[in-house]
Image (cartoon, coloured by chain):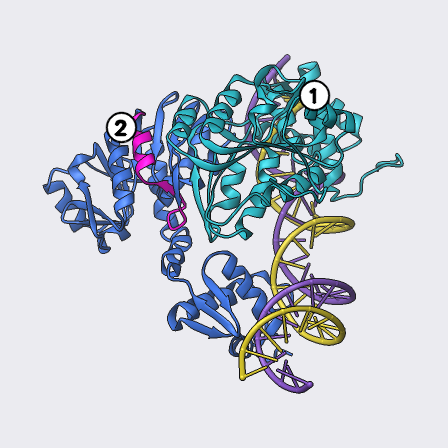
Chain colours: A cyan, B blue, C yellow, D purple
DNA sequence: GCTTCTTAACACCAGATTGTGTTATCGAAT
DNA sequence: ATTCGATAACACAATCTGGTGTTAAGAAGC
């Protein structure tokens, strides 16, 4: 049927995801999409488009209506969240590896709602008995029931955009806790400060920082080119900032000049 | 190799699960199992047994030692927890269906850590906009991100045996909340009172009961033949007790005599 | 009514996953 | 040192999962 060169074979998972991504994009851009026009545009059957719209709808990205689908107001939010999972995977692995060097058996560890944090969480079960505190649902699921891991979940209102629990209740709970180490991440770094997109995450992250003895910031180099809305803290507020080996030299130099305690993951340098 | 009639083919997922279940059983019974004897008993290679033990170990069911594996003290706990999921599935479905009749759009709903609660949770996304509060991880995962569901998770220490968050912190959080309806279950009913196996669950359930306007108890008939250690509450403390249609007449009569507000799921009677 | 859109049911395909055994290597106990 | 157990690496098989199209039946709009 499909005649174009890049026709995805049947059962092509990647191809389907890509198409759905494009559909999602389009419905956000245009507000409405026709089933038939999508079928033609992607050269698939109408049935397949219906199925695509079904899954997109069940994820809250759009709403099906007769003849097509309309955009969901909150669609912009949801969008990028699920996708940052794959991004910078190698850098995150590297950061997590470095971070694990700071974990000693018996310690209590806080992890925030970040994919980098998830990478750290993956390594924890093999690092001996630990108490882990997190507001990140993915991390909770990863660590729940793992032998040697005492898990304390931070409750609160669930934010699908972050797959995490945030809000006042969460911050309050955090303040009643205390941990040895906090591993956290940030969405953007500018001028020696880290920034976030939403008020809620900032509040929770501040609370986490206040409740931990050692504050470790894990930063992959993509963060230096991004921008955030709300200032969270200066990098000097952290006891250690770990960057991956792909970080530009000038960025690192700039931070060192500001007195930021920097460590490069995979550099072989000893950790403090 | 395998000569017996029921020799499972390679890549037989069901067969492998079954074998692991038997291994688990055996290590709980005997306290220790030899790798080689298992390999002979199930007519598989030693390597396969090693792999079985690996997955069982990673699930916290046993601990590998040289030559075999020893039972994990908490194994008995874990055991039945995962299994009660299937038990009484039909009754739970019936109860959940009845419960959903008490839910009106916009309401806030509490659900405790029970498989019956999970059955209720499954129906909630289709019942219009709702706020759901729960300490049950399975329910959290089920409802997270569902459109129309505002999810509030109750944090606290994670108890693998219940797949839920329990403890002081959880109870405290609950007391700061308020909900319209509470759907809860119990492990045993004797003499018009419900009982539980552990202190932690009782504390949390009491807190839940205190924070809800309407308290609904969902009971499948298997609960009448079980016993619990810690008394939770009298059935008269609930605004409504829903039982499934398989409940013996004499039990229902006894409860009615005590003044328990009873409803039989699937009976067609109107709900209060 | 008729048309169009939607959904359910079936069959099929391909890649991913899982389970498995063999062999080789490594590590620990005697 | 030698033996036995554990693991890693490979190769293979069966099943599972996810995606797809076709057809037929059902629902919604005109």
Q: Residue at x 55, y 79 (%)?
A: B40
A112 left or right of A66? Answer: left
Q: Circle 2 sits in a helix, a strand or a loop, which is it?
A: loop
Q: Chain of mark 1?
A: A
**B20 is higher (above) or lower (below) than B212:** below
| Mark 2 or 1, closer to the camera | 1
Q: Residues within 10 Å of mark 1 (few under 14, many from 20)?
A: few
Magenta residues, start to end: B159-176
Mark carried by residue B211 = 2
Residue B162 on the magenta segment:
yes
Extreme-left residue of the structure: B257
**A104 is higher (above) or lower (below) than A251:** below
Residue B23 on the magenta segment:
no
**Quadrant assignment, res B118:** top left
B80 left or right of A191? Answer: left
Q: Residues within 10 Å of mark 2 (few under 14, many from 20)?
A: many
Residue closer to the observer: B76 or D21: B76
Q: Is residue A135 visible?
A: no
Mark carried by residue A97 = none
Query: x, y percentage for residue B85?
Result: 41, 50
Q: Which residue is disc 1 drawn over? A: A226
A166 left or right of B157? Answer: right
């Amino acid at each position: 049927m499909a005649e174009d060169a890049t026709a995805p074979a049947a059962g092509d998972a990647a191809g389907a995801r890509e198409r759905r991504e494009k559909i999602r994009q389009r419905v956000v851009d245009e507000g409405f999409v026709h089933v038939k026009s999508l079928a033609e545009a992607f050269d698939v059957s109408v049935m397949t488009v219906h199925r695509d719209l079904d899954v997109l709808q069940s994820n809250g990205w759009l709403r099906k209506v007769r003849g097509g689908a309309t955009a969901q107001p909150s669609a912009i939010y949801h969008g990028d969240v699920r996708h940052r999972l794959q991004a910078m995977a190698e850098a995150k692995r590297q950061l997590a590896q470095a971070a694990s060097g700071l974990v000693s058996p018996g310690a209590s560890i806080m992890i925030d709602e970040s994919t980098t944090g998830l990478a750290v969480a993956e390594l924890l079960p093999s690092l001996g008995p630990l108490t882990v505190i997190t507001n990140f649902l993915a991390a909770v699921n990863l660590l729940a029931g793992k032998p040697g891991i005492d898990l304390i979940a931070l409750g609160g209102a669930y934010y699908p955009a972050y797959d995490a629990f945030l809000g006042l209740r969460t911050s309050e709970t955090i303040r009643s806790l205390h941990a040895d180490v906090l591993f956290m991440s940030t969405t953007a770094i500018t001028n020696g400060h880290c920034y976030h997109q939403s008020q809620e995450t900032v509040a929770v992250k501040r609370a986490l920082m206040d409740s931990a003895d050692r504050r470790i910031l894990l930063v992959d180099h993509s963060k230096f080119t991004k921008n955030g809305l709300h200032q969270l803290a200066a990098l000097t507020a952290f006891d250690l900032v770990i960057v991956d080996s792909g970080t530009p030299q000038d960025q690192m130099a700039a931070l060192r000049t500001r007195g930021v305690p920097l460590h490069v993951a995979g550099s072989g340098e000893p950790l403090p």
